[in-house]
Image (cartoon, rainbow, N blue to C red):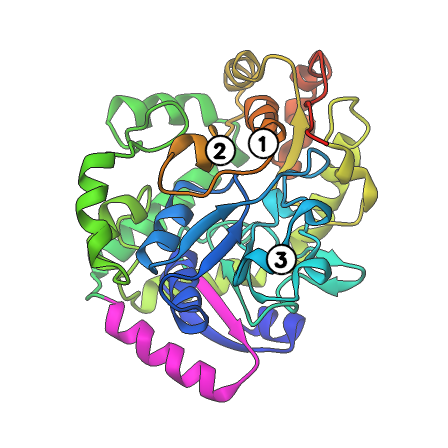
Amino acid sequence: MKYLAERTGRLCLSLPSNRLGLYLALRHWCSPGQRLLMSPLSADEILFLVLAAGLRPVIAPLSPRDGNIDAARVDLAGVDAVLTTNLYGLPDDAPALSGKILIEDAAHAMGSSVGGRPVGTFGQAAVFSLSKHPGAGSGGVLVVDDEADLKALTAARDELMVPGSAWADLWSVAGSTARRAALRLDLVRPALWLQRALGLQEPRQGYRIALDAERLEQVLGHAPSLPPFDRWVHADLHRYRARRGRLARWYQDRRMAGVPEERARRVAGVRLLAELPTVAPAVRDDLGQPLFRVPLLVRDRDAAITALERHGVATGYLYDPPYDEYAPGLTEPSPDPEPARWWARHVLPVDPVYASRALPILRGLQPPEATPPRRP
């Protein structure tokens, strides 16, 4: 946590996952029934965390430049709080959104900045992920300014955590180490085949987990409460509330220590991919951002994914369809949904650390035939 404490200048709370930290922040600063402005595109579990906190998701219009909330087109007067996404590390316009309670989801943006100020320093709280830039497999950090808030959040964390397991920690560390080795040794293709053959990937409907609307409707009455929503929130990380033991904490510290050293590799990959005609426009705004993924906007995204896998490059972190189409009735829909649909259909996130390996495929990709229609 030392790196994040120094980078943000804030107090840090260690967590078993980023998603637990987001729930704690939403419950601490927001009241049940309040309206939360959020991006239409983010991980599945984020929507369920908002519902578990008893909040009403208000879906913002999306900017096709960066895939984040289009701050110039939102009405903050109609909401009580804002949750940013900082998609793939491209920062939200936090200064423009800070007139309300602001919670920053900084999972993708550990090294990103807005106007020279680090992401994670604008809102009442920010939550970072140790499974993204550090590649630690699990873990999160919640950062705040006030000692009283930290104390209350620590108590709330301890109430929600469940007992851990040394064997589960060992399996998690071994799995994370194996994934990194597969990437480094160019063994992604056989690793993906083995995962699928063993049924180790979370079942999904397209790119989203199964909503199971009927069962979800049954648990909505339990909000605000997190455990009833576990079956949705724990997607791809079933131990998101489990205490981590000494081995897991050692591995997280070890992986965090390498983040500053990897920054240069990420930035070099960002600059390489920024030369492609398919790169999202906002990537070129600041070529010094160490993005988690570089978003390209391509004509046939699914065919590109298949071609990349054949070339030993895995693609993930796809959030399609947008929340208001994925969970109609559970969200207040965006006033202009088309840009989000267009982005979700065409975005191809590429790891800048392995940009050179992907380039032979990426250079042959074409941009979408049309730009997204926007309502006036």
First of labels 1, 2 by sequence position? 2
Residue 307 position by quadrant = top right
SS at mark 1 in the image = helix
Residue located beneath label 3 in the image: 76
Q: Is residue 204 left or right of residue 362?
A: left
Residue located beneath label 1 in the image: 340
Q: Amino acid at mark 3?
A: Leu
Magenta residues, start to end: 140-161
Q: Is residue 303 magenta?
A: no
Q: What is the number of the mark on residue 322? A: 2
Residue 140 at x, y percent in the picture: 44, 62
First of labels 1, 3 by sequence position? 3
> Residue at left 47%, top 27%?
188
Residue 160 at x, y percent in the picture: 26, 68
Q: Amino acid at mark 2?
A: Pro
Residue 171 at x, y percent in the picture: 27, 49
Pick the residue in front: 236 or 60.
60
The reply to whether callout 1 and callout 2 are in contact (CB within 8 Å) is: yes
Marks 1 and 2, how far apart at CA: 6 Å
